[in-house]
Amino acid sequence: QVQLVESGGGLVQPGGSLGLSCAASGRFFSINGMTWYRQAPGKQRELVATISTGGSANYADSVKGRFTISRDNAKNTVYLQMNSLKPEDTAVYYCNAIISVDAVRRAYWGQGTQVTVSS
């Protein structure tokens, strides 16, 4: 059974930094794209940043220059470093990964981790 387990959320003051990680575990053949999404109260889930197997990254305009996505393929882990955090970054952050299991490729989701930016 494939699982994505996130860690690193919490409370931080505006202008502060926080790092998230998401590790895949279980039996699988390969992991393709890995993506961070977020969902604020009363809003739709939105893409924050995505990274390919080769390390090519793309970001939402709202986080460009402040957030950095990276991955360690040997550890099956994706990271999100968040700097210069703003109150509007407050949301539940979800990890998503496209994983191949027995020749079937599908998206898996983590359980979500709360990030709160407040003074």
Image (cartoon, rainbow, N blue to C red):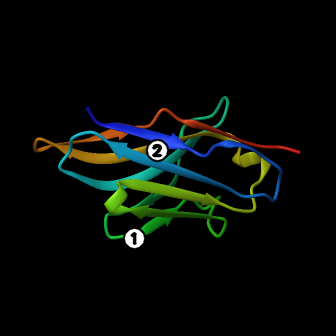
Q: Which mark is residue 56?
A: 1
The quadrant in which residue 91 appears is top right
Q: CA distance from mark 1 to mark 2?
A: 17 Å
Q: Which mark is residue 18?
A: none
Q: Earlier in the sequence, mark 1 or mark 2?
A: 1
Question: The residue tagged with tag 1: helix, strand or loop?
Answer: loop
Q: Quadrant of the N terminus?
A: top left
Q: Quadrant of the C terminus?
A: top right
Q: Position of residue 75 (x, y in %)?
A: 36, 57
Callout 2 amino acid: Cys
- Crowd band around label 1 with a 10 angstrom C-alpha radius: few (<14), some (14–19), many (20+): few
The quadrant in which residue 10 appears is top right
Q: Is residue 114 above or below residue 81?
A: above
Describe residue 15's horizontal placement relative to residue 114 as left or right. Answer: right
Along the line of sight, the residue nearer the viewer: 68 or 18? 18
Q: Residue at x 30, y 48 (%)?
A: 98
Question: The residue tagged with tag 2: helix, strand or loop?
Answer: strand
Q: Residue furthest right?
A: 119
Q: Is residue 50 above or below residue 22?
A: below
Q: Residue at x 60, y 46 (%)?
A: 8
Q: Which residue is mark 2?
A: 95
Callout 1 amino acid: Ser
Describe residue 114's horizontal placement relative to residue 58 as left or right. Answer: right
Q: Residue at x 21, y 41 (%)?
A: 27
Describe residue 118's horizontal placement relative to residue 76 as left or right. Answer: right
Q: Residue at x 44, y 55 (%)?
A: 78
Q: Position of residue 25 (x, y in %)?
A: 32, 42
Along the line of sight, the residue nearer the viewer: 91 or 11? 11
Labels in figure, total: 2
Q: Is residue 36 above or below residue 26?
A: below
- Crowd band around label 2 with a 10 angstrom C-alpha radius: few (<14), some (14–19), many (20+): many
